Amino acid sequence: MLAGKRVLLIIGGGIAAYKVLDLIRRLRERGAEVTPVMTRAAEEFVTPLSVSALAGTEVHRDLFDLTKEAEMGHIQLSRVADLVVVAPATADLMGKMAGGLANDLASTLLMATDTPVMIVPAMNVRMWEHPATQRNLALLQGDGVTVVGPNSGDMACGEFGPGRMSEPMEIVEAITAKLSTGPLAGKRVLVTSGPTHEPIDPVRYIANRSSGAQGTAIANALRDLGAEVIFVTGPADAARPKGVTVVEVESAREMHAAVHDALPVDAGVFAAAVADWRVASASDSKIKKTAGGLPVLEFAENPDILAEVSQLATGRPGLVVGFAAETDDVVAHATAKRQRKGCDWIVANDVSPATGIMGGSENAIILISEDGAEPWERMGKDEVARRLAARIADALGSA
Ligand code: CTP
């Protein structure tokens, strides 16, 4: 799938650099040509000899190398690739990129390139969460840089949390998606998925039974057609899709903010089962049993994310797809919902317990659009996702 694709791989100085050796191998197995560049710090973690042996080509290391400048100047080097990948992207490299510094070969190439750039951050959790890193991340995303990971987990430094570099196969999938030439290549699509958790107090919450399976399948299917997918998910059981930008949220209000941060997009698919209400009287401390009687929860309405995005005066996605989970009069309710919320399509399904759809692996949907109601036969959620993604590609292609 990557045959003939050229990747300029900038290796930063972090412990995760060892995973890049495997990444190079896997990219080459798939037919990609990898041109490695190492920072000085990277050489503390992996040797240029290993990198060069795996890449099957020399490693570029110096900005001021007269022989290389004569053969291929650094400006040219920055432009011969289809994609520039920075892995591991350290806090330092991200800072340099965000600040526009160019004081070594890696940062100079990043400034000089006219090729899409992908970064794969890896750093200590505190460094990742530091406001400076988060600020740089936002700047880089605003500049159109694709960000892969980081994952959460145990870290080499002994701490736990986000900051671990994505695994080589996750990076390969992200690169494949980015270099895809599918019908959705160059399109940015937002998918919301999963339930939301609405806190009652710090230890209790109100939730629903959504597993996130359908939303995840849709994100995967859109990615497979070449879309850049921003996947905003509540705390769902389903494994997160690979090769897409994953934004984890808990509550409806967090989802609302994350969706707005993701705009503009070409299409939005709102598959999340967002809680309609939150607990207005949520307590900052754990509610205790008291002799005074039972606690009374007061509710407040959550923002309707789908309706709001559908009705945006400026920046509305070209196609907005909502979901309707109904238990009776499915078509009538879903048709009314489409009108009320102002979206283009509604994917309606019957979630009565007898259908086994909510939390199950199959779905039987009715696609409601301005052309009316189109029932699809019952099929796996993956197949629903593939067909829906193909329809979205058709709609965006003919828009
Ligand atoms: N949705 C949303 N934000 C909300 C509630 C719902 O974005 N606060 C989206 C869902 O992701 C879904 C669609 O709206 O795409 C339908 O949600 P649903 O809860 O079924 O609609 P309601 O308007 O709440 O209707 P009902 O009275 O059936 O609950």
Image: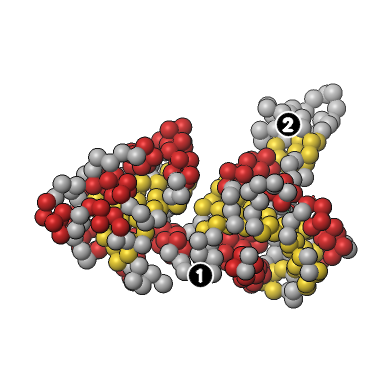
Determine the residue positioned at 20% across, 54% down.
73
Colour treatment of the image: secondary structure
Circle 2 sits in a helix, a strand or a loop, which is it?
A: loop
Q: Is residue 391 left or right of residue 178?
A: right
**Residue 301 x %, y %:** 78, 39
Q: Nearer the viewer, residue 340 or 156?
A: 340
Q: Is residue 86 left or right of residue 290?
A: left
Q: Is residue 384 left or right of residue 338?
A: left
Q: For the C terminus, which image quadrant?
A: bottom right
Q: Is residue 218 in view?
A: yes
Badge 1, how many Cα within 10 Å: few under 14, some, many 20+? some
Circle 1 sits in a helix, a strand or a loop, which is it?
A: loop
Q: Nearer the viewer, residue 30 or 204?
A: 30
Determine the residue positioned at 13% across, 56% down.
70
Amino acid type shown at disc 1: Gly
Disc number for residue 182:
1
Determine the residue positioned at 74% across, 27% down.
288
Q: Is residue 295 left or right of residue 93?
A: right
- Of discs 2 and 1, which sits in the foreground? 1
- Give the quadrant of residue 28: bottom left
Disc number for residue 282:
2
Q: Is residue 346 above or below residue 377?
A: above
Tell me which numbered mark, 2 or 1, is placed earlier along the sequence. Answer: 1
Q: Is residue 195 in view?
A: no
Q: Nearer the viewer, residue 77 or 214?
A: 77
**Residue 75 x %, y %:** 25, 53
**Residue 116 x %, y %:** 40, 55
Disc number for residue 213:
none
Amino acid type shown at disc 2: Ala
Residue extending farthest to the bottom is 377
Circles 2, 1 touching at the beta carbon (< 8 Å): no
Determine the residue positioned at 23% across, 47% down.
105
